[in-house]
């Protein structure tokens, strides 16, 4: 499905300093605009076409039922899928931004999406939902604009990026920087480095249990060229085919920027500002966002519930365990009636 593009022809100031001279925001909608609105915030390398990457969710009878709800998802700032990012043309130079694209934060993305919501005439919604980096966005929005959403669903996420996550991100950036094409003014600069970065990221997304289950050898006599080696290279090359290293680099920095306590006294104080009825969903094997992070949020978000999904697929469980997630979210909807 081709994305809609909203063109915002005004300067857009950025939290870390500087500005974008104008802004384009790519977005998808599903269902009819007269229905209650569910706004989905997507994860790191996903896009605004929720039905494309979150399989078995934008389906009748599921938690993103397009016959019951008007579903909106906007591509994040700095990404590869239509919203202004490093491969966009800088109107001040007539050339793509590439490495000159400025540092962006989660709060910048939410301000961009607030502009889109105003353009669409959306003032209040039923549910704001996000997983991973999408959870960062949904949490920020629920704090920046407490009356915007009635319900908040946060999946496999946290109130601040931990040093553990930043360490993974910095290691990925080091891999990109080690590619001597990174920095060149071309769309495919840093491609080999990004492939290595993606392979590093997968270790944190899946974890030992998933790898040992899905990539086990059938031949006990194998010495080299193991199945998992081709898997890592395949996954790296898949990202290269659909993304760019300049966006990937900036988006990992966006991840690192996340701390809802910044400028708000403390993380605890920030969480207490959330008015929406909230469902927190953790995955018991998640290496990046452990259950303990969700327990902390549940303790400090006033009207919140915590559910835990049992899965061997670690952080990627929010994508793999669609049926378990659907059951928990539909229960949450029903309990709010």
Image (cartoon, rainbow, N blue to C red):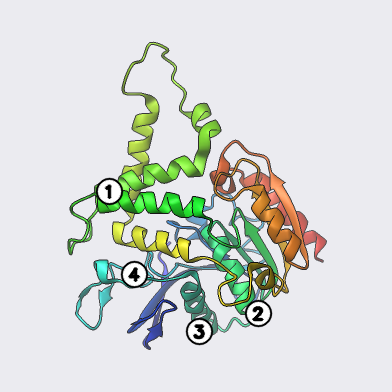
Judged from the image, the secondary structure of the residue bearing numbered disc 3 is helix
Is residue 39 something one can see in this rendering? no
In 3D space, how far apart are the residues under numbered discs 4 and 3 (Cα atoms)?
20 Å
Q: Residues within 10 Å of mark 2 (few under 14, many from 20)?
A: some
Direction from residue 51 to residue 238 in the image, left or right:
left
Towards the viewer: 204 or 186:
204
Q: Which residue is mark 2?
A: 124
Dot 1 or dot 2: first in sequence order is 2
Towards the viewer: 290 or 217:
290
Mark sitting on residue 85: 4
Q: Residues within 10 Å of mark 4 (few under 14, many from 20)?
A: many
Q: Quadrant of residue 330?
A: bottom right
In 3D space, how far apart are the residues under numbered discs 3 and 1 (Cα atoms)?
38 Å
Q: Which residue is mark 1?
A: 193
Q: Which residue is mark 3?
A: 119
- Residue at (26% x, 77% y) in the render: 90
């Amino acid at each position: 499905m081709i994305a809609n593009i909203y063109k915002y022809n005004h300067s857009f100031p950025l939290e870390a300093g500087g500005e974008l001279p104008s802004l384009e925001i790519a977005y998808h909608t599903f269902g009819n605009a007269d229905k209650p609105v569910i706004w989905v915030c997507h994860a790191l390398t996903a896009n605004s076409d929720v039905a494309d990457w979150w399989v078995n969710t934008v389906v009748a009878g599921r938690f993103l039922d397009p016959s019951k709800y008007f579903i909106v998802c906007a591509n994040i700032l700095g990404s590869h899928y239509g919203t202004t990012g490093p491969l966009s043309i800088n109107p001040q130079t007539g050339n793509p931004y590439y490495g000159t694209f400025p540092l962006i934060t989660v709060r910048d993305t939410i301000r961009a999406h607030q502009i889109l919501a105003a353009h669409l005439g959306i003032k209040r919604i039923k549910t704001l939902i996000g997983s991973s980096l999408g959870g960062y966005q949904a949490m920020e929005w629920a704090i920046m604009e407490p009356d915007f959403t009635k319900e908040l669903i946060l999946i496999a996420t946290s109130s601040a990026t931990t040093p553990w996550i930043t360490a993974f991100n910095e290691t990925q950036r080091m891999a990109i920087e080690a590619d001597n094409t990174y920095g060149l003014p071309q769309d495919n600069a840093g491609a080999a480095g990004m492939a290595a970065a993606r392979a590093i990221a997968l270790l944190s997304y899946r974890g030992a249990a998933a790898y040992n289950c899905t990539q086990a050898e059938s031949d006990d006599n194998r010495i080299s060229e193991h199945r998992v080696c081709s898997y890592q290279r395949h996954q790296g090359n898949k990202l290269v085919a659909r993304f760019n290293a300049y966006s990937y680099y900036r988006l990992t920095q966006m991840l690192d920027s996340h701390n809802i306590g910044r400028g708000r006294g403390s993380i605890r104080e920030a969480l207490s500002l959330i008015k929406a009825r909230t469902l927190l969903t953790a995955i018991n094997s998640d290496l990046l966002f452990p259950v303990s992070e969700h327990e902390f949020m549940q303790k400090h978000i006033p009207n919140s519930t915590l559910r835990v999904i049992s899965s061997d697929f670690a952080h990627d469980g929010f994508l793999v365990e669609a049926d378990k997630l659907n059951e928990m979210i539909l229960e949450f909807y029903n309990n709010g009636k």
